[in-house]
Image: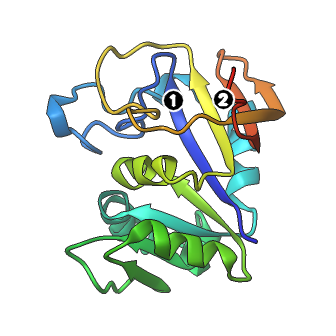
């Protein structure tokens, strides 16, 4: 069975909105885009490249796909695997793209993702994709969190764990601290929360 691995840049107060660029996602009046830039270093770069060079397919929301589509399709030399990976995109408004291979999902996304997980193939990496991610959490479909937690609070913005997240337990399977204080952790699903916990 394929795993769903959520990879996110995360502030101490749980925000993962618009980490990479000023205009990446200004929805809701978010004004802190590009907040990860001061924290880049070689330790983090090595950890990121390891994930980028793994075997994976992508599971993305439409907005994240549309941020990535014009850039990564034109820069295959930077991240070759992102272009060859199958991109499963949850969207009610799109059904095709020049950036291939892409498969658009519409309707009961949770059921479709469950079916994709049962197929043979690479693990499914989720980056950004806030609305899709909340649906995955509500339907208990996430197997692994790979999080880069930054020493910053943002006070507003889209948060990783919104209302509707199901109780679950996870096991720490990797941890790294960068020279600039970013904590990189991998949590793998360990089970359900005991009723009396």
Q: How many marks?
A: 2
How dense is the environment of label 2, judged by Cα within 10 Å: few (below 14), some, or many (20 and up)?
few
Image quadrant in which you'd find residue 148: top right
Front position in the image: 117 or 19: 117
What is the x, y in percent for residue 19? 41, 35
Task: Name the outermost residue toward the right.
Answer: 173
State the residue at coordinates (53%, 39%): 166
Q: Nearer the viewer, residue 132 or 83?
A: 132
- Residue 196 x, y percent position in the rendering: 69, 21
Callout 2 secondary element: loop
Above or below, 177 relative to 78: above
Q: Earlier in the sequence, mark 1 or mark 2?
A: 1
* Number of the label disc, if any, that sits on residue 80: none
Asked if residue 42 can be seen in this view, the reply is no
Residue placed under numbered mark 1 in the picture: 10
Residue drawn where x is 35% and y is 40% of the image: 21
The residue at which mark 2 appears reads as 41
């Amino acid at each position: 069975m394929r795993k769903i691995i959520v990879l996110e840049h995360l502030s101490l107060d749980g925000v993962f909105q618009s980490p990479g660029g000023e205009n990446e996602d200004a929805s809701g009046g978010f004004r802190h885009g590009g907040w990860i830039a001061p924290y880049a270093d070689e330790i983090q770069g090595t950890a990121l490249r390891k994930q980028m060079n793994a075997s994976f397919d992508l599971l993305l929301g439409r907005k994240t796909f549309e941020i990535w589509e014009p850039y990564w399709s034109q820069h295959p030399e930077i991240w070759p695997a992102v272009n060859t990976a199958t991109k499963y995109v949850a969207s009610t408004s799109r059904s095709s793209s020049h950036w291939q291979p892409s498969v658009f999902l519409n309707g009961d996304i949770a059921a479709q993702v469950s079916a994709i997980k049962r197929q043979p193939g690479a693990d499914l990496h989720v980056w950004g994709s806030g609305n899709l991610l909340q649906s995955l959490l509500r339907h208990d479909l996430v197997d692994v969190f790979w999080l880069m937690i930054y020493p910053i609070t943002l006070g507003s913005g889209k948060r990783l764990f919104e209302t509707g997240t199901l109780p679950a337990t996870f096991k720490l399977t990797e941890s790294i601290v960068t020279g600039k204080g970013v904590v990189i952790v991998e949590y793998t699903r360990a089970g359900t929360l005991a009723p009396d916990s």
